[in-house]
Image (cartoon, grey):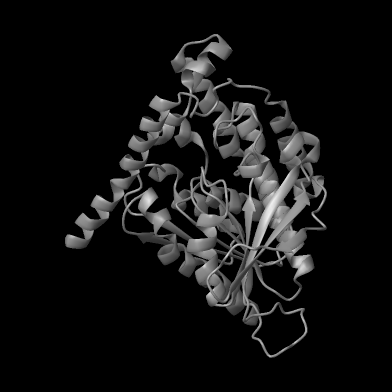
Amino acid sequence: MRQKLRSVLLSFQDYGFVANALLQQRRNPKLKFFHEGFGDLAPFHQIRAALAQDGQSAFADITKIDFERSNRKMPEPVELYKGTYHTPMEAYYTDANRTGHVVLVKGRNFRFAHEQDDGRPVIKGLVVTLPATGDEGISFRSRVLSEPLARQGYASLNCIVPLYGPRKPSTQTKYHAATVGDFMGQVVGCYVEAAKLIRYCRNSYPETPVGISGLSWGAAMSAVAGCILDDGDLAMSGGVAATSPIGLATGLMSHEVDFDALARDAGVSKADARDQLVGIFQETSDFTREPTILSILAAGTSRKLVAAYVAAEHDHIVPPSEGGEALLQVMQPMLSYEKLSYVEGGHVSMMMNSGRHLVPAIVESFEQLAKLKRE
């Protein structure tokens, strides 16, 4: 009983997160998604059509990342390398958004399998990580995920996704995409780039198992990235994922959407603008389920896909119908192993404690993949 009460109380942090966002919006009304309206959705539909026809092979691979050692102080024995690359989505992006940014975090006491044997143990796995909504940098993931993973012999490639951090256009306020078109382009760009980064890791770090993980929005994007790949084994994991962004339009996070701007742009009522937005978001949800994507997945029948995901017992931000169980149900036909674990608290508390909850899931995904490959 006491543990259940603790879980419920922790979940109230979801409401605290919303209250804080509302206070910030009083100071700056532009701290909302889509303050410039619906925008141009054509690029999203073009990318979607290309993926439906050819999968991730519709776009060029990432063949080079320029790394340099970071001067940022990291706790021993963790080291960090910053890298940049040209996005395969270059035709659809402009200016700074065309340059992708990643940070490689690893333990100094470990080496990659392809490197000369100098007595150090081999890195057990390399995981590409994607951020939660609003996590524009790499500091949070480096601290709560990468550092504890590095000490256990795992490396991380933390991505800065399109429209975040140095990839943010001048018309954007913080992490809030200025238009629905920008947001939808960000969504598909995020999982296409992540899929290409998985392939880059396989090619650049041969013999090192590769995985992908993320938090919240990033967990959903990591799942889709794994799904549009058509080759290679993969350790997949994530925390408090959702199968679509519909909750942004209808749930506790809807305060983040500028429905007044959408209504003005479309010349309709706020209720109709909300319905239009839900319809657009529904396309994203359907896209992860439609037969073309599942057939791309099924093409890699010889590969092993492992999924270890974490959900919150009292998540007030991701509705149960769009949560972890729904996500695994979508992927289930292609999975060699699946596990969904529930942890105490809500959406926010799970993310803040992801070092305690998600790190073990990441490790488990690699261990289960290794076990399946031995069998």
- Residue that protrudes farthest toward the left in the picture: 1
Against 173, residue 229 (above or below) is below
Quadrant where the image shows the N terminus: bottom left
- Residue that protrudes farthest toward the bottom in the picture: 119
Residue 145: horizontal and vertical position, in percent?
Answer: 51, 63
Residue 230: horizontal and vertical position, in percent?
Answer: 73, 57
Which residue is drawn at the image coordinates 78% and 84% (left, top)? Answer: 116
Picture quadrant where residue 312 is located: bottom left
Picture quadrant where residue 334 is located: bottom right
Quadrant where the image shows the C terminus: bottom right
Which residue is drawn at the image coordinates 53% and 58% (left, top)? Answer: 141
Q: Viewed as shown, does residue 127 lie left or right of 133?
A: right
Against 186, residue 333 (above or below) is below
Residue 35: horizontal and vertical position, in percent?
Answer: 54, 22
Residue 339 appearing in the image: no
Residue 127 appearing in the image: yes
Count the labels in the image. 0
Q: Nearer the viewer, residue 273 or 205?
A: 205
Which residue is drawn at the image coordinates 79% and 40% (left, top)? Answer: 90
